[in-house]
Image: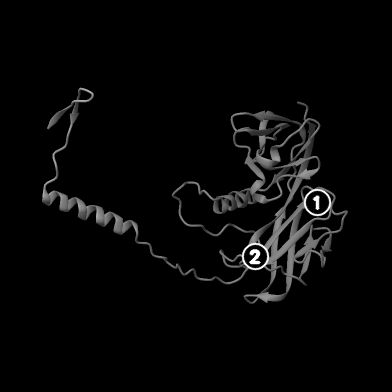
Amino acid sequence: MDKMDTKYGLIVKTRPALSQPNLYKAMVVVLIIFTLAGCTERIEIELDSTYARLSVEGYITTDTMAHWVRLSETTDYYNSTPPPPIVDATVEIDDGENIITLTEYDSKPGYYFTPDDYFGVPGRTYDLNIQLSEDINNKKNYTATSELKPVANLDSIMIVYNPDFEGWEVRVFALDPPTEDFYSFQVYKNGVLQSDTINEVSITDDRFFNGSYLNGVPAYFMRGDDADIQPGDVITLKMGGITKDFFTFVAELRDETFRFRNPLFSGPPANIISNVSGDAVGYFTAYASSYASTVYEE
């Protein structure tokens, strides 16, 4: 029914009052909604523990430096403590011509280092041999193999601010050979490595530019705290010629450890590939390196 508002001269729409049965139904619905909204229950999900494995991380490059291999023991997924390091192991690297024994330092348990003047040679295959002092699941001996492939030379790089993504692009100028190649990219700012975790290493294959000249192609993107680039800063790009298997390993590692999975509704995490024998996890790789630097001028 409509009625006249005598104060403002407006027609006001009015609703008929609820009948007694309808009012009762409405009250029941409201009561159910509030009851369900107030019900919470803590659900404890039991996650089974798995058996421990050897975890291996190691790199041999063409840079002259002390390279390292890191050994640790895996723990449960939601374990908040760091993985325990593996100490007192015997770690050797064989390049087909020489065999060296890596040295463990008390200051870095679980890390085994080559001599300071060690460097990899393109074209050689590097075998990693590990012998533990105490077995893991009745296993003491582990091996891994990686070919050290050559890499194209970087002619130069440039750094350009991208306002759309609010960050900096490091662009590459280099000739890609006509072979199938895979690359990794890491960035230094004023001599300090910015991509200090494997998830921050940029990787790519050459399917879209095989055999072509890379004329300013973006190879690395910097944003956040790392992207505080000031005039006079020296930016250095390290390009590595990695193997196809290591490329796959990094891609799978990112897919399983990123907060947002790709695709969004993909399946549960799965085991990542490894080139270490004995049911171990991780990867040992060898690759050649190429460097180029630029000084940012505003």
As helix, strand or loop, the secondary structure at mark 1 comes to: loop
Q: Residue furthest top?
A: 9
Q: Residue at x 17, y 52 (%)?
A: 25
Q: CA distance from mark 2 to mark 1?
A: 22 Å
* Viewer-proximal residue among 292 and 44: 44
- In the image, is 96 to the left or to the right of 77? right
Among numbered discs 2 and 1, the one appearing first in the sequence: 1
Give the residue type at disc 1: Gly
Give the residue type at disc 2: Ser
As helix, strand or loop, the secondary structure at mark 2 comes to: loop
* Viewer-proximal residue among 120 and 77: 77
The percent coordinates of residue 272 (x first, y second) are 57, 57
Residue 251 vertical position relative to residue 139 in the rendered view, above or below: above
Circle 1 residues within 10 Å: few <14, some 14–19, many ≥20: many
Q: Which residue is mark 1?
A: 120
Q: Residue at x 44, y 49 (%)?
A: 265
Mark 2–mark 1 CB contact (< 8 Å): no
The percent coordinates of residue 192 (x first, y second) are 78, 44
Q: Which residue is mark 2?
A: 277
Circle 2 residues within 10 Å: few <14, some 14–19, many ≥20: some
Q: Residue at x 79, y 58 (%)?
A: 96
Quadrant that contains the N terminus? top left
